[in-house]
Image (tube, rainbow, N blue to C red):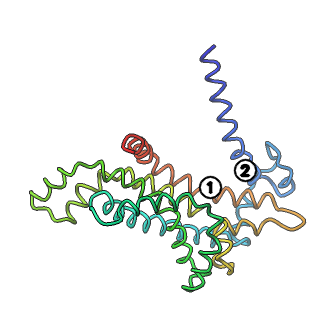
Amino acid sequence: MRAAAKGLGVTGVLVFTLFPVYLMIVTALNGEANAGSRTLWPDEWTFRNFAYVVTEGGFGRYLTNSLVVALATVLAGALLALLAAVAVARFRFRFRTSVLVMVLIIQMVPVEALVIPLFIQARTFQMLDSLFGLVVVYLAFSLPFAIWTLRGFVAAVPVELEEAAYLDGASWGRMFRSVLLPLVAPGLVATSVFSFIVAWNEFIFALTFMSDDQNYTVAVGLRRFFGQHATDWGAVMAASTLITIPVMVFFVIAQKRLTDGLVAGAVKG
């Protein structure tokens, strides 16, 4: 009875989470005649919708823009967050506690409340309609979480290991690469996945900051297939499938390290 209830629960969760993905893929592979019918099993299988969104819909350019923005956010965020985490975890300086509290407060501010202030700043520094400006904005949102998470990993590394490396003649850079970096790698992966998802799925800032179609990301470019009076659901689902693939690939690559990082983070705090 208990095993049956457990199996029923697992099946229910799988159906609830996977059925929307199945419906998205089936609709994307559906023939043009049935593209809007959203049937569970299409009469005609075709990649026509994918070819349309990439060639005529310009979705390849949107994917490239999103990849550039997401990867730049991940790389810059990992570097800046790690340096900041080492600073707050290892060094004593004035207003150190205030900095940590400020990081927490920034995380609590709703994204919608910051659209106008950040838009004014971006306009002042001439970063509107720029992928670089979008990366800077996404860093502002992903860095507080990354710094707070990595601080726990850095603080958990025994100082004695660093002192032993110094006694063996290692420079600060060598100690950083050979001792500290491998031990905080799970935390770096966990925060990188978070930063990638933030940059990949974000819509409000990409829509507000970008005006040139050439600079649209996938979240904004997806609107192109929604018409005022009719929607090409085959194209929408094909574009949605293409958006999902890079996130799944990135998650699968980082999955092992991500699990280790989340477990270690839960223990270390």
Q: Is residue 11 left or right of residue 78?
A: right
Q: Position of residue 70 (x, y in %)?
A: 53, 66
**Other residues around mark 1 within 10 Å, as few (<14) / some (14–19) / many (≥20):** some
- Earlier in the chain: of badge 1 and badge 2, it is 2
Q: Position of residue 150 (x, y in %)?
A: 38, 55
Which amino acid, by three-letter code, is at mark 2?
A: Met
Q: Residue furthest top?
A: 1
Query: The C terminus appears in which quarter of the rendering?
Result: top left
Which residue is found at the position 59% from the left and 75% from the top? 118
Kindly state the secondary structure of the residue where label 2 is placed: helix
Residue 244: image tag: 1
The three-letter amino acid code for the residue at tag 1 is Thr
Residue topped by disc 2: 24
Q: Looking at the image, do the residues carrying marks 1 and 2 touch, with CB atoms under 8 Å apart? A: yes
Which of the two residues, 223 or 121, is positioned nearer the viewer here?
121
Q: Is residue 95 above or below residue 17?
A: below
Image quadrant in which you'd find residue 112:
bottom right
